Image: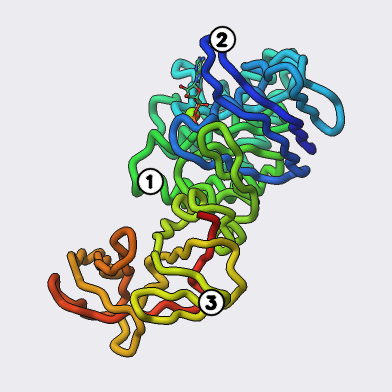
Amino acid sequence: MTLTLSKVAKTFPDGTRALNPTSLEIAEGEILSLLGPSGCGKTTLLRIIAGLESADAGGTLSFNGEDVTRLPVERRKIGMVFQNYALFPNMSVRGNIGYGLKMAGLPRAAIAARVAEVVALCRLEPYADRAITALSGGQRQRVALARAVAPRPRVLLLDEPLSALDAALRTDLRDELAELLRAVGTTAVFVTHDQDEAMAIADRVAVMSMGNMLQIGAPEALYRRPADAFVARFVGNAMPLGGRIEGDRLLIDGAVLPLAQPAHGTTAWVRGEDIALDDAGPLPATVDAVTFLGTHYRIKLTTTGPAPLFSLHHGHSAPRPGDTVRLSIPPHAILTLPA
Ligand code: ADP
Ligand code: MG
């Protein structure tokens, strides 16, 4: 199902402007992630799509071209998965998954058939007759997804479904959820404040800040061509380099760094993985701190730039705090952005 938002905005009765006019099209079967810091309006937008919150006058929402702006939540055919799963603890896995179908008045045999189908799809066969309380966090998450999917919703809405889990489990479940959502094939909107999660799960990511949708694109496009400094920082932790852009060069600290592309703005940015310690590099720096992180060292550096730079260094040894080093940055890794 195609989902179209046109100038959807939300001001709450107390005057809080949670969402500025937002227009967006989500394609059939697409998984879109809304990514942004806490309070930027992600849940508000999701609740408007669900019909749990009304959009301000002037905004419209349509499903496959049908205007659903005023359609009540129970008639929108939406599936929802929340952070806390909101499962019924006194019912079995099968009972939970079949609940929506029972409410819809489906015959018993049809319910059993659909539940069996979804149980298989979500790989819940071994647990189908267990009580919810006898399941792990990851299994509960699968049940929550299965329950949302069972009534064949037109769109699936997921609001930070991994946030309640601890870090190690989250990474596993993130990949599993990405696989499951693709297997289910339903158009989905996935809310998260975690960049890795958004990139791992979504076909396209919409970056939000303070009620505005700043940029929307495939994970790689956002990462390689962020539209502004907020997106560059939020997606991949870009850092300001300082210096002055002149034509196709960055002049910094007496050094000249070539740019791979014509500048898109007046400020230069770089990511930690693109800063190499290199005796022949053009940029001088002082080592402030070194943190060993197993796969790499994280080296805090002072240059003449506006903020410390952090280099992610994959060597077998690292310099020490106080050392003077030289840095090189490949031309393609220098992002130029509006000030
Ligand atoms: P997110 O999900 O990105 O963390 P929300 O959509 O929950 O953000 O909130 C966006 C903004 O709207 C925040 O400033 C929040 O405090 C405000 N907000 C959310 N719900 C209400 C409400 N019912 N009444 C007033 N303000 C609200
Ligand atoms: Mg939220």
Which picture quadrant has residue 185?
A: top right
Residue 105 is left or right of residue 91, and the answer is right
Q: Position of residue 135 (x, y in %)?
A: 41, 32
Q: Is residue 26 left or right of residue 273?
A: right
Query: Gap between marks 1 and 3, in whole Å?
Result: 41 Å
Q: Which mark is residue 13?
A: 2
Residue 95 screen position, x and y as percent:
57, 21
- Residue occupying the point 21% across, 77% down: 318
Which numbered disc covers residue 169? 1
Q: Which residue is mark 3?
A: 259
Q: Is mark 1 within 8 Å of ligand 2?
A: no
Q: Are marks 1 and 3 in contact (CB under 8 Å)?
A: no
Quarter holding residue 81: top right
The amino acid pointed to by label 1 is Leu
**Would you say the beta carbon of the disc 2 residue lies within 8 angstroms of ligand 1?**
yes
Specify the farthest residue to the bottom: 280
Q: Earlier in the sequence, mark 2 or mark 3?
A: 2
The answer to whether residue 144 shows anywhere in this view is no
Q: Which numbered disc flags the more N-terminal residue, 2 or 1?
A: 2
Q: Earlier in the sequence, mark 1 or mark 3?
A: 1
Identify the residue shown where x is 54% and y is 45%. 177
Q: Residue at x 67, y 16 (%)?
A: 54
Q: Look at label 2 and name its amino acid.
A: Pro
Which structural element holds mark 2? loop
Comparing labels 1 and 3, the label whose residue is closer to the camera = 3
Amino acid marked by disc 3? Leu
**Residue nearest the viewer, comparing 282 with 143:** 282
| Dot 2 crowding, Cα within 10 Å, few <14, some 14–19, many 20+ | few
